[in-house]
């Protein structure tokens, strides 16, 4: 029996929490209180619109009850939408970001408060959301999946504190995290490639530019097939084909307590990856793959097998006031034994020396030596002055940069600006700022875009003046030439120079490979991407690049395998579904192509996949209707993809007409013309060569006569 005054019911519970509030309170109590009150006013205006009942506030957190999971989710989305719009027009230090967690379950009302599993679980879910994000339980996802116009990303099964069984959790993918389906595909590669910690963030841009822009609508799910890159693991020992001279740096644990200090521990982890990559004969796993094992429950043997390495470097970092403590441990992945460990307590001012000491100790333990000290120094992300405040600002810029949203690019730019203000000769920070401004400009249009591109150009030119041998600066310049100027030949030259200066940076290597594919040699890009996957074996985006190159080279079965690897790593998102749809179109399998296209989330990607699939079927009315749909919706924004549909209809006059419209519209996806799945069928048409000359690509005759490099 329930106690008098006690009410039990099923309810949806939402927890919200301000990101970084405690740290801000310590730095600027007045500003913290001001933002806290503004945040409360904003949220209290939104709650009643969705029948939310405020139960209580806990510091900077809200506990809200709703009658349904749908109302809770709609309220959470509206909150994040309102804050995203607000944050667009303020400086980074005045942004208000929330984490939101939602669960539906049994609750008990007693004495004006709410108790029960519904409350406990919601409170445990909220910290797992990203800043500006929403995390929900499987119970919530089931009830709202068909009622909200968002998609969901399933998280790994998670053990929540004081909750007896692992829970299935989902992240709500918010619509403004991308500008359109095309830009969503750009984000796919940004997140997959990741930014290497030596500041080479500009390098990823080419991956974004070259495949995703053009092949955004390719890829989907089928049963998992043989992997393209594999390291079979026999029982009882080290997996086969894993060299002894191999290591993965797992992300250092942030022991400082403050969540907004994670940028510091992540930054140091990435620095160790970059530094170890400079040693002869040492295979070092890239950030994208190794960071997937943050807080992993897997044992060392399993992680080593998945990453294809013999050794793991793990540890923790704590920074407090003027001191820093780092614990590092080198582990034999096969049996978990410790080969070397050390605890360092140093003044913060000795941070760079401490990083060098750790790198040297690990290299000595693995009996390897530095390849080229001068090259390593030239690509270093440390400020020339040794100014630690500038370095700290740079790390924060990198942290936001890697989140790849419009709002985060703005924050990254602010931190990079702070870094160069503290050290005006900080070339890496100028390069990072130029890269972030280039992508931010691509989010804009008209005069605003041109103004942002102009600022990017100034930053990149400054970086190149300060350090002409900085690979990151040349990579950023390549991206700007492609995005702002549509100067693809100039971009290719800059990527070639970037790789020459920083040959160990696989993001640059992969970017250059895709640029060569764009210049008519997709088959020449296959092996560099395969080699990049050896060092970054869980990079889903690179499997997408590999699939594009294999498809363009006519190896459809291998391309399909690469898509399955991408799916296995990141799930059956609409990018992979579009890729498999295109492969089925090329095979002439109309039924399979249509079935795949229909699985894609409604929107631009689905519309074009359906239009492509319909062109190889026998239903002329459906074919014409699908074409009309994309023309009505996207004539002003995606003429290139309409040209592809006409190519499938075997109407070259219309295909070339729409290609010309794409160029007039300044659609930079035209650069993937040579490894597009459909348009190269007209390479023998004189208009194909004429269009290539117009946009700065070689003609088919020049491709046939020239080198594949």
Image (spheres, rainbow, N blue to C red):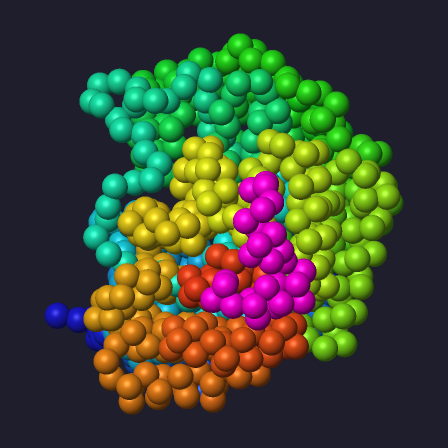
Report the residue at 76% width, 70% height from top. Answer: 450
Report the residue at 43% width, 64% height from top. Answer: 681
Q: Quadrant of residue 627?
A: bottom left
Q: Nearer the viewer, residue 315 or 507?
A: 507
- Quarter of the rendering occupied by the C terminus: top right
As drawn, 472 above or below 614 = above
Q: Nearer the viewer, residue 414 or 41?
A: 414
As drawn, 146 above or below 125 = below
Residue 346, image x and y in percent? Answer: 68, 24
What secondary structure is the stretch in magenta mostly built from?
A: helix
Q: Nearer the viewer, residue 267 or 119?
A: 267
As drawn, 70 above or below 505 = below
Q: Nearer the viewer, residue 647 or 582?
A: 647
Q: Given the current orientation, which residue lies at the most extreme left position?
A: 1
Q: What is the total number of numbered labels drawn onto the structure image?
A: 0
- Quarter of the rendering occupied by the N terminus: bottom left
In the rendered structure, the answer to whether residue 292 lies left or right of residue 320 reads left
Q: Residue 87: tell me if it is visible.
A: no
Q: Is residue 689 magenta?
A: yes
In the rendered structure, the answer to whether residue 371 lies left or right of residue 67 reads right
Report the residue at 46% width, 37% height from top. Answer: 527
> Magenta stretch?
682-709
Q: Is residue 555 magenta?
A: no
Q: Residue 526: tell me if it is visible.
A: yes
Residue 419, image x and y in percent? Answer: 78, 47
């Amino acid at each position: 029996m329930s106690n008098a005054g006690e009410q039990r019911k099923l309810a949806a519970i939402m927890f919200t929490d301000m990101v970084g509030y405690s740290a801000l309170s310590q730095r600027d109590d007045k500003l913290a209180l001001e933002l806290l009150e503004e945040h409360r006013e904003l949220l209290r205006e939104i709650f009643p619109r969705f029948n939310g009942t405020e139960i209580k506030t806990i510091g900077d957190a809200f506990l809200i009850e709703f009658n349904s999971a749908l109302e809770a989710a709609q309220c959470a989305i509206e909150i994040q939408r309102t804050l995203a719009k607000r944050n667009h027009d303020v400086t980074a230090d005045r942004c208000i970001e929330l984490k939101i967690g939602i669960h539906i379950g049994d609750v008990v009302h007693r004495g004006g408060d709410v108790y029960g599993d519904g409350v406990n679980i919601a409170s445990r879910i909220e910290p797992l959301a990203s800043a500006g994000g929403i995390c929900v339980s499987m119970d919530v996802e089931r009830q709202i999946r068909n009622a909200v116009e968002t998609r969901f990303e399933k998280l790994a099964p998670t053990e929540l504190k004081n909750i007896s069984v692992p829970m299935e959790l989902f992240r709500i993918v918010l619509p403004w995290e991308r500008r359109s389906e095309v830009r969503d595909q750009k984000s796919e590669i940004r997140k997959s490639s990741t930014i290497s910690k030596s500041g080479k963030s500009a390098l990823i841009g080419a991956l974004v530019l070259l495949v995703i822009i053009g092949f955004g609508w390719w890829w989907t799910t089928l049963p998992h097939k043989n992997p393209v890159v594999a390291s079979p693991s026999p029982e009882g020992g080290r997996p086969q084909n894993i060299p002894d001279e191999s290591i993965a740096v797992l992300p250092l644990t942030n022991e400082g307590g403050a969540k907004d200090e994670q940028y510091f521990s992540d930054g140091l982890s990435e620095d160790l990856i970059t530094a170890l990559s400079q040693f002869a004969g040492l295979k070092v796993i890239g950030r994208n793959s190794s960071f997937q094992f943050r807080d992993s429950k897997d044992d060392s043997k399993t992680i080593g097998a998945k990453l294809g390495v013999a050794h793991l470097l793990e540890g923790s970092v704590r920074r407090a006031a003027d001191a820093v403590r780092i614990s590092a441990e080198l582990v034999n992945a096969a049996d978990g034994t410790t080969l070397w460990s050390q605890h360092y307590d140093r003044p913060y001012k000795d941070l760079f020396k401490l990083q060098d000491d750790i790198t040297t100790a690990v290299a000595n333990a693995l009996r390897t030596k530095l390849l080229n000290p001068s090259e390593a120094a030239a690509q270093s992300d440390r400020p020339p002055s040794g100014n630690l405040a500038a370095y700290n600002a740079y790390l924060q810029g990198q942290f936001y940069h890697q989140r790849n949203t419009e709002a985060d690019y703005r924050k990254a730019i602010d931190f990079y600006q702070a870094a160069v203000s503290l050290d005006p000769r900080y070339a890496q920070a100028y390069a990072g700022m130029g890269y972030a401004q280039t992508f931010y400009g691509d989010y804009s249009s008209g005069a605003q875009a041109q103004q942002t591109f102009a600022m990017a150009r100034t930053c990149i030119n400054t970086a190149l003046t300060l350090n002409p041998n900085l690979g990151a600066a040349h990579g950023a310049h390549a991206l700007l030439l492609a995005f702002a100027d549509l100067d693809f030949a100039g971009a290719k030259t800059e990527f070639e120079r970037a790789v020459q200066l920083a040959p160990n940076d696989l993001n640059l290597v992969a970017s250059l490979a895709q640029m060569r594919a764009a210049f008519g040699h997709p088959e020449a890009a296959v092996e560099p991407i395969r080699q990049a996957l050896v060092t970054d074996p869980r990079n889903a985006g690179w499997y997408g690049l590999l699939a594009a190159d294999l498809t363009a080279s006519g190896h459809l079965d291998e391309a399909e395998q690469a898509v399955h690897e991408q799916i296995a790593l990141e799930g059956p998102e609409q990018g992979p579904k579009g890729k498999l749809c295109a492969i089925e179109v090329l095979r002439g399998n109309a039924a399979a192509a249509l079935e795949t296209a229909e699985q894609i989330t409604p929107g631009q990607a689905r519309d074009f996949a359906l239009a492509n699939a319909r062109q190889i079927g026998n239903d002329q009315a459906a074919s014409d209707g699908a074409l009309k749909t994309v023309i009505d919706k996207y004539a002003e924004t995606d003429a290139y993809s309409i040209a592809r549909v006409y190519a499938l209809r075997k109407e070259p006059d219309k295909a070339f007409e729409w290609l010309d419209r794409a160029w007039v519209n300044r659609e930079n996806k035209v650069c993937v013309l040579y490894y597009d799945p459909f348009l190269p069928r007209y390479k023998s048409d004189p208009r194909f060569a004429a269009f290539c000359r117009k946009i700065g690509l070689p003609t088919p005759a020049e491709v046939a006569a020239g080198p594949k490099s």
